[in-house]
Amino acid sequence: MTEADGTTGSDAPTTTGDAGGLPADEVELLEAFERLAPAGSFRWGFDDAMRRLSSPDERGTWVEPWDGLPADLWDRGRGAKASERMLGDVIAVLAQELTEYSQRIVDDVRRTVPTDTAVFDALRYLAARVERLEAAADPLGIRPADLALPAPDASAWVEALPAWLGAVDGRPVVVGELGDRSVLEAVVGTGADVDAVDPRAALSWTVRDAAPGRPGQVRATVGDVVEHLAGLPAGSRSAVVLSGCVDRSSLDGKATLVTAAARALESGGALVLLVTDQAAWDADLEPPVRDLLPGRPFHADTWAVVLAHLGLEDPEVHLAERGSVHAVVARRPR
Amino acid sequence: MTGPAPAGGGGAGGGRLPGIHLFVPMLHRRDAVGEHTRVLRGLLVAAGVPSTIYTELPDPDTVDETRPFRDYEHDAVAGDVLVYQVATRSDMTRWLAKRPEPVVLNYHSLTPAVFFAPWNNGIARMQEAAARDLADLAPRCALGIGVSDFDVAELRAAGCPSTRVVPVVNVPLPPVEPDPAALAALARRTAAGGPWWLSVGRLAPNKAHQETIAALFVARATTAPDAHLTIVGGPTEPHYAAALRRYAADLGLSGAVEFTTRLSPGELAARYATADVLVMLSEHEGFGVPLVEAMSQGLPVVAYDAGAVAEIVGDAGVLLDRKGPRAVAAAVAALLDDPDRRHALVAAGRARLGALGLEHAGSDLVRALREVAAGA
């Protein structure tokens, strides 16, 4: 059975509000909820306002706020790192604020000044500044995670790895990026409690396959390795094993990464870097991938210098006898 | 290649039987699409049809049940049929469009982006992209299966050349027994005052839970000062979910509106068993599983006539063509004040379940898929 709007009670007011015919007090009640929405749907609001500002034909009326969404924005945002997303959100809120204030200004000006070109020029200038800020945060919209980057094959070192890690049975060990899974399996084999960190969402499948039947031994974190390491208590991990991220990071990124790893190590704890040979990197990667990544691998000897500079003891360089991944091992002083 | 061995045994496609494999962006528990997919796979396997669930992303809760969808490229067997559970945007859509196997769209309704636009541009963009992807894939699908006429109309509009209606297969029949402990606790609570309204559905803007809260506010101010509302649902959109709590608090309803989620089937059944009415004011429903759950648990329904709601409820509930807070409160009060009408609706609801064909939905769906496989 279908019922029409039953506004027939004795308490129903006679005045009506919106086009739907709801009484004004009901409209007010529902609008109280709409005011709890966040600072608006930021991008379309901004883009739409700017489009109207730059199109003389549309200055006379405010168009409906919903006008579709830029097709590529979702794709651009998917692989963004948390820090970049946060920056994007801040910019978006700024843009929305700017748009809202601009609307108020233009409304006021329209009421009082017949010719408002100067106002629009000023707003366009502000818009351009914001767009430049957005572009600085995301110049190309291409993320490392979107590139076809093969996982380093570190399987040559799985037999040596337990000795480098030392007695870690039941101790916490970080494996930063899981590559071809062989390193994770080797660390799992030591009996360590493993923090497995990888930006790829498929991490859960990798962990499942690397540690079958041992639930709880491996804790999976989908995310940025350096952010994960930076969030760990100092001296809380018995070993850290890094691959992948050590190769493609920028110089700043490399420094931040190994500094965070060294900080997380307990006294005597081992830092193991599995680094791709530069010649293999150049030969194996497609040119666009090579060009668009923020960095390229250090030589293993360079890593030894960096680790010593950070105060880690006796860096050892193990050059690959097979495969294209070298190993660099150092320890935090006791 | 990762994950459990593909259904059908053997390896790398060699020696395996053709199957009907299910593709879903993520497989979640306690989620309508996820449970539908898991039940469907069980039905296929029980019917002797090899079936594996492939996903774009793993959910840690179900990772042991799924494989990465690109692994299917290694698992493919001539004669396979691929069934895509359409509910949101996924990279799988474009990949499926290029596969040579017959693709069946099992459509669960795409929530239009406009509902999310004021709350979350990311989700809004995703829904827009999903609609575009559906329009790309639909014209080449072998069959489009909607869970309601409403959904099938959307499939046809997207370009599906062949369509069929088969209801959801994850509604437990007979209904789940209420959890005794939860039932006892809720019974004590409802005995202390009422009536208790129930609203079940994700905390997503298209569900319009705020309008139920507003109606409760009016009811408490007029006819039912002790009325309470339980909203069962996880937060799809965090800002919206937070705003609902804030709205209830701003209206002085913090003690009258309960938000809860992650209930077991028995705990959810206890909510239905102890509530006085299900209020559903959703703006966009492709099926409305809570409507069916309410009817099967003997709970009368007051719902807004949108999407597939009228198609599912029929004459077994109070349907509103407008839903101002005062109208909703009045409709609920009128229903609760009329025991004969309430009993008539409950009886009509139980009869309605049979008319929906839910008992045969599983076998109907498997038969439809096998017909596609036979023609492959």
Image: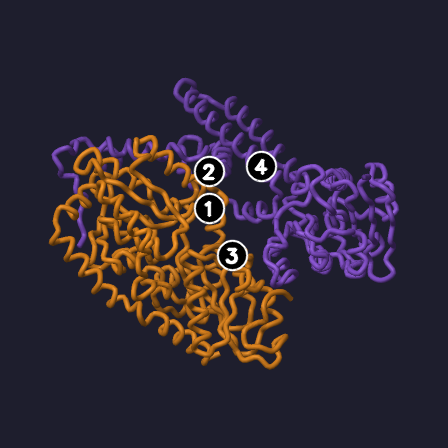
Chain colours: A purple, B orange
Query: Tags 4 and 1 in contact by the CB under 8 Å rule?
Result: no
Instruction: Please give the name of the residue rendered at 30% of the width and 62% of the height, measured from the top-left corner.
Output: B175
Query: Tags 2 and 3 in contact by the CB under 8 Å rule?
Result: no
Query: Tags 1 and 2 in contact by the CB under 8 Å rule?
Result: yes
From the top left corner, tell me how far across and down residue A28 is, in percent.
Answer: 28, 31
Residue extending furthest top? A112
Residue picked out by circle 4: A86
Query: Tags 1 and 3 in contact by the CB under 8 Å rule?
Result: no
Q: Is residue A325 left or right of residue B240?
A: right
From the top left corner, tell me how far across and down residue B98 is, in percent.
Answer: 56, 66
Q: SS for tag 3?
A: loop
Give the alpha-carbon distance from disc 1 to disc 2, as whole Å: 9 Å
From the top left corner, tell me how far across and down residue B235 is, in percent.
Answer: 43, 45
Chain of the residue under the numbered disc 4 shown in the image: A
Residue picked out by circle 1: B124
Residue picked out by circle 3: B61
Instruction: Please give the name of the residue rendered at 56% of the width and 78% of the height, measured from the top-left corner.
Output: B78
- Near mark 2 (Cα within 10 A), the count class, few <14, some 14-19 or many ≥20, is many
Residue picked out by circle 2: A41
Q: Does B160 appear above or below A235?
A: below
Dot 1 and dot 2 within a common chain? no
From the top left corner, tell me how far across and down residue A173 is, in percent.
Answer: 70, 49
